[in-house]
Image: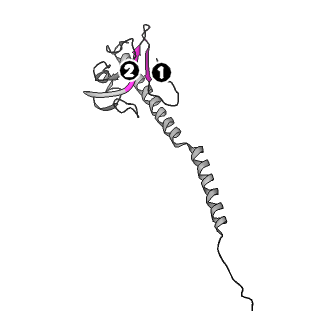
Amino acid sequence: MKKILNRKGFTLVEVLLVVVIIAILAAIVIIAINPARQIAQANNTQRSSDVQALINAVHQSAIDNRGTLPAAITAVATVVGSGVGQIDICADVVPTYMAAMPFDPTATDAAYTDCTAYNTGYTILKTVEGRVTVAAPAAELEKVISVTR
């Protein structure tokens, strides 16, 4: 009398092998996607858009004022904001040329609610030739985000 055992299921080795394969595939996917890099790229895209919008607004303001740039813009790269030591150009560009002042997506002290208290985190300067440069000094991934017009 021989008893036949009918075993159904997987062995421990088979289960562990499947878990290891899934872990390896998950690691490869996470490395390929690299969420931190994707977020940094999205932030840089926002900065590029903000810098373009800010320089366009300053340029349009100058055109409407017979080529005269806002008087607050100096020859030294200075943060655009309403605080001490910052360049306040909000009244020159908001709401005529921009709905609101843009601000850096990652700067902890950058924000805009109205023209009385804001900090963009972006810098602006005027060269001797009268050209304006707006830059995003907090750009990530070793990118330089700057526009001169």
The quadrant in which residue 126 appears is top left
- Tag shown at residue 147: 1
Residue 54 in the image, given as x and y percentages of width and height: 40, 25
**Magenta region, main secondary structure:** strand
Q: Which residues are magenta?
A: 121-136
Q: Amino acid at mark 1?
A: Val
Say above or below: 71 vs 16: above
- Tag shown at residue 58: 2
Residue 91 in the image, given as x and y percentages of width and height: 28, 23
Residue 57 in the image, given as x and y percentages of width and height: 38, 23
Query: How has the structure been colored for display?
Result: one colour
In the image, 86: left or right of 138?
left
The quadrant in which residue 33 appears is top right
Task: Name the one closer to the observer, 10 or 136.
Answer: 10
Q: Of marks 1 and 2, which one's residue comes earlier in the chain?
A: 2
Say above or below: 11 vs 135: below
